[in-house]
Image (cartoon, rainbow, N blue to C red):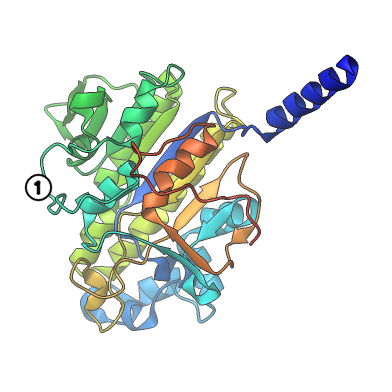
Amino acid sequence: MKSRFLGLILCLTVFVSMAQNKTENIVLVTMDGYRWQELFEGAEWKLVNNKKQNVNCEWTKSTYWDADPKVSRKKIMPFVWDVIATKGQLFGNRNLGSNAELFNNLKFSYPGYSELFCGYVDKKVNSNDYPDNPNYNLIDFIQEQEKYKGKVAFFGTWDAFPRIINNKRNNTPAYVSCNWKDGKIQCLNAVATNPSVEIPKTTPWSEMDTMTYWLAKDYMVKNHPKFLFIGFDETDHYSHGGKYDAYLTVANQQDAYLKDLWNSIQTDPFYKDKTTLIVTCDHGRGVLGMNSWKHHGHVRKAHETFFMFLGPDTPAQGENVAPGKFELRQLASTIASLLNLNYDGKGKAAKAYNLAATR
């Protein structure tokens, strides 16, 4: 009887061990205000063919347009469709019944990012100028875990991120709104003199995001944070300005950074096969009319978003076709579950999405 009991305990121990996720690190990237329409359907003809919204329509069409949406979307984001779509998962193609969306009804940045990191919505968080977020969030929780304490870092092009995660409370280093001044890279909360990373030249439409990316990557290589956030912004910036060619080019540049980031992860023993890459956004944009795509907040459809996952615990299912919805408020607990942690936002957070569920 004793041997049977010990055998049962051994089997249960093996089963629990097998059930543990392999993810030990998270790299979370956001593409501010990028539409699911371009991600899944490619460039929109009426926009690429509009002279008011492109410096050179013919260049924009030849670079990003194709009558086949699958060809066009790959022209914009080749890494996403060559790698994430074959080795990971994408949510949000509403043409396939996959609905990714916000739970908050404000549909602009601070409330969106607050929902993302808190896992729940606070209706009082209703302005991009909102002060330090009083709500308990995923970053607070992760910093409380011995394995992750002091191993979290934030890099963003928008200067609101320290307030959104309340880094004064959880002591998370946040490097945002970086620029060159007097021969130094200056960021909110940090000044890097003589940085070892060389910022490469890129399209003039993506200068700020480029600085954000290379500083984040340099920090990742040197310091090996176990939770790294990179918040891009210029997709939102140029869409507000009605510059469709710039919007697509910035998305294309961010895709190149995702490729470089993933290659770095998979060639670094600290991260290789132990890291999940997640890509999402804080809100969508409008779809109706020639100018609706520029806006969010007050416009219809701007709650529609997307999620992408690539890592050792994400089954290679490509585009999700399961009916239902994946809400932004579920991401915090989903991230924690990938790390074998249970985040409930002190009883407020939405439940984790099961990435291993059937399509």
Position of 184 compared to 21: left or right? left
In this rendering, the answer to whether 214 lies above or below 112 is above
Query: Residue 121 location in percent, x, y?
Result: 27, 51
Quadrant of image for the C terminus:
bottom right
* Number of dots carrying numbers: 1
- Residue 184 can be seen in this image: no
Quarter of image, res 33: bottom left
Give amino acid for label 1.
Asp
Identify the residue under disc 1: 129
Query: Residue 49 location in percent, x, y?
Result: 33, 82
Give the residue drawn at x 45%, y 22%. 224
- Residue 294 can be seen in this image: yes
Quarter of image, res 272: top right
Q: SS at mark 1?
A: loop
Give the residue drawn at x 75%, y 28%. 12
Quarter of image, res 321: bottom right
Position of 1 compared to 35: left or right? right
Query: Residue 37 location in percent, x, y?
Result: 41, 71
Q: Residues within 10 Å of mark 1 (few under 14, many from 20)?
A: few
Position of 23 compared to 198: left or right? right
Q: Nearer the viewer, residue 16 or 242?
A: 16
Q: Nearer the viewer, residue 276 or 86?
A: 276
Quadrant of image for the N terminus:
top right
